[in-house]
Image (cartoon, grey):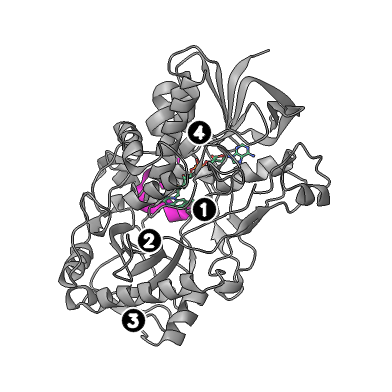
Amino acid sequence: MSRWDYVIVGAGSAGCVLADRLSADGTAQVLLIEAGTGTPETRPEVQVPILFPRLFGGDLDWNFATVPQRGLADRAIPIPRGKAVGGSSVINAQLWTRGHRADYDAWAETGLDGWSHDDLQPYFERAEQRISLTGLRHPLPVTPAFVNACAHLGYAPAAEVQEGYALARATHRDGLRHSSADAYLAPARKRPNLTVRADTFVRRVVFEGTRAVGIEVEGDSGTETIRAEREVILAAGSVGSPHLLLLSGVGPAGELSRHGVPLVQDVPSVGRDLTDHLLVPLAFEAEGFWSPGANASSEQIAQYLRDRHGAMDSIISEALLFLRTRDELEAPDIEVVHLVVPLGEHQRPAAHGLALGVILLRPRSRGTITLRSADPHDAPLIDPGYLSDEAGDDLATLVAGVRSAQQVLRQPEFAQWMGKPLTDGALSEEIDDITAYIRTTGGSIHHLVSTCRMGADEHSVVDPNFAVRGLTGLRVVDASTMPSIVRAHTHAPVTMLAERAADVFLQQR
Ligand SMILES: Cc1cc2nc3c(=O)[nH]c(=O)nc-3n(C[C@H](O)[C@H](O)[C@H](O)COP(=O)(O)OP(=O)(O)OC[C@H]3O[C@@H](n4cnc5c(N)ncnc54)[C@H](O)[C@@H]3O)c2cc1C
């Protein structure tokens, strides 16, 4: 029988980093378990940058949805999550953003010593030596028009500090997606002390008293228990990790007892503090340009894979604008992302178009992940509680953000590329119209975090060493452990977090 020191659950953005770093010196036996396929890179939709929306709802996506959101006209919002070796980095939009200094300094101010912006930069730098980053090789003409419109409105180019406008940086190598599996696992896979088991669904963590000793999995040969001599590390993501803790008896005692799950440890905040970035798409028909990839045929895709040339290397989000809706703020509270495809659900769908996505960067609303049932195959209830903050600050900030984006849309050099709005009200300046527009079109930009929140306080789920409070042998490292949401797309921050966790684990061996 095999003997494993570390058993890592989930081969996503965090899990791939951990598997590589913990196996690097050859002394520990590392097993990385993943529910999804081990060979996602065989799909053109994974490789060709522009095609990622075609992956939503397919077999590389867990295909979750929220419970109906009162703040969003009672709509259930789709929540895609990657299900493959590489995790969400296999289906994501490939943007790489580090976040703002204020995000990390705020973590340090809560008592997380060593987690300030300056402390964390070396971990971003380490990640950027592994993940290949490139600028846009063929931006559409509408993209410099967006940048010029921002400049004319007085915004500055973003440089050291993430504020103002910038062209996108993409996780690409040679015109193809560069996932965490490509960056971290591919070079490590030949090590004899690292085993990757794909197509293996984890049901729960197994305990002896309060010590985690392994996991129960379903694979080709049925259900089995895999022991971990040193540690079980959950890296199953912001939905998967709290779900596994709850299924294993670690969570709010009342909730577990309602579902008949035997209690191992009462940790009331498991699944609490769910935070996500809400995006409102102001979308328009295209005027004088074609959205790349919209109707790409299999011949065109094969051609791109051969020569890697042309607009199919677009990641749809070609430029970003980080802005403050009030001068007195210490950092941006809104991001406007310039999309060269009219993503989102609209009254009049169109293949070719553009959109400005208005993103609420520091939402006050909080939500939950809770058990639907004790069956591991029943997806948990996901309730991000969008726009549920009592004071209504989130809605007020988004209204101001929409107005700022409308100013960009009205700049003549940008407006010349826009046709009719795809949903009525996109250009209305009336507060009631904007509010209705936000409620009927807002959706997730897929940055769910903090459901197993790390903190120096005793109410957090994991301590600053990523250990689950009250238990031994169990850590959580992924987007779920983020102390609070950052002003960034979350792949880079999660990769940084995992780089730092690997350091902590290696120091504590
Ligand atoms: C559609 C989409 C677009 C996005 N776009 C961007 C972007 O452009 N830029 C950006 O920075 N961020 C983006 N993000 C967010 C970013 O990709 C995620 O925050 C990040 O990948 C999360 O990493 P993670 O390690 O926490 O989880 P994941 O990468 O999701 O990894 C979790 C892994 O655990 C596995 N798993 C879960 N449960 C089990 C189980 N029971 N048994 C076995 N395995 C299990 C999953 O299959 C998955 O592989 C996007 C996300 C999505 C979904």
Q: CA distance from mark 2 to mark 4?
A: 34 Å
Q: Secondary structure at mark 1?
A: loop
Q: Identify the secondary structure beneath mark 2.
A: loop
Which residue corresponds to mark 4? 15
- Frontmost of labels 2 and 1 is 1
Q: Give the amino acid type for the residue marked by disc 2 in the picture.
A: Asn
Residue 499: x and y in percent read 42, 32
Label located before the other in sequence (1 or 3): 3
Q: Secondary structure at mark 4?
A: helix
Whether residue 4 is visible to the viewer of this picture, yes or no, is: yes
Residue 44 located within the stretch drawn in magenta: yes
Residue drawn at the location 65% of the way across and 27% of the way down: 472
Residues 52 and 294: in front is 52
Q: Which residues are magenta?
A: 43-54
Binning the other alpha carbons within 10 Å of mark 4 as few (below 14), some (14 to 19) or many (20 upward) gives: many
Residue behind mark 2: 295
Q: Are marks 3 and 4 in contact (CB under 8 Å)?
A: no
Disc 3: CA contacts within 10 A as few (<14), some (14-19) or many (>=20): some
Q: CA distance from mark 4 to mark 1?
A: 17 Å
* Amino acid at circle 4: Gly
Horizontal arrangement in the rendering, residue 186 relative to residue 101 (left or right): right
The residue carrying mark 1 is 448
Please give the residue where the numbered disc 3 appears in the rendered image: 420
User: Can you give x and y, in whole percent of width and height, for residue 325 in the image?
Assistant: 33, 71
> Mark 3 or mark 2, which is nearer the start of the sequence?
2
Classified by dominant secondary structure, the portion drawn in magenta counts as helix
Name which of mark 4 and mark 1 comes first in the sequence.
Answer: 4
